[in-house]
Amino acid sequence: MIKLPVKQWGNSHAIRLPKSLLEALKVEKDDELNVEVMNHSIVLTKAKKEVTFEELFKGYNKETFTTELQHFSPIENEKW
């Protein structure tokens, strides 16, 4: 267990998370954490990062894609 001191930060209070804890959560600079209070405990989880359009297509070399049109038939009462 790690004990962290609560310090004054402007009009608020703050704790600093040690590097070992951030590494265990795989948190890096500018990542975000989700904070929940459960049974008088604070639970921190790494927030899922939204992917930008640029990140989504990083490494794309303008290669062409070919697809085949697939036809499906209803199994029960689906309306297509």
Image: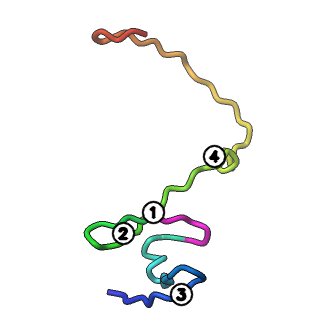
First in sequence: mark 2 vs mark 1: 1
Which quadrant of the structure image shows residue 30? bottom right
Work out how far the residue at label 2 is from the one at label 3, CA to CA, in angstroms. 21 Å
Residue position marked by numbered label 3 in the rendering: 8
**Picture residue at 50% right of the left edge, 88% below the top:** 7
The amino acid type, in three-letter code, at marker 3 is Gln
Is disc 4 in contact with disc 3, using a CB cutoff of under 8 Å?
no
Helix, strand or loop under label 3: strand
- Numbered tag placed on residue 34 in the rendering: 1
Work out how far the residue at label 1 is from the one at label 3, CA to CA, in angstroms. 22 Å
The amino acid type, in three-letter code, at marker 1 is Asn
**Picture residue at 48% right of the left edge, 83% below the top:** 15
The amino acid type, in three-letter code, at marker 4 is Leu
Q: Does the magenta segment cover residue 6? A: no
**Picture residue at 35% right of the left edge, 10% below the top:** 74
First in sequence: mark 4 vs mark 2: 2
Helix, strand or loop under label 1: strand
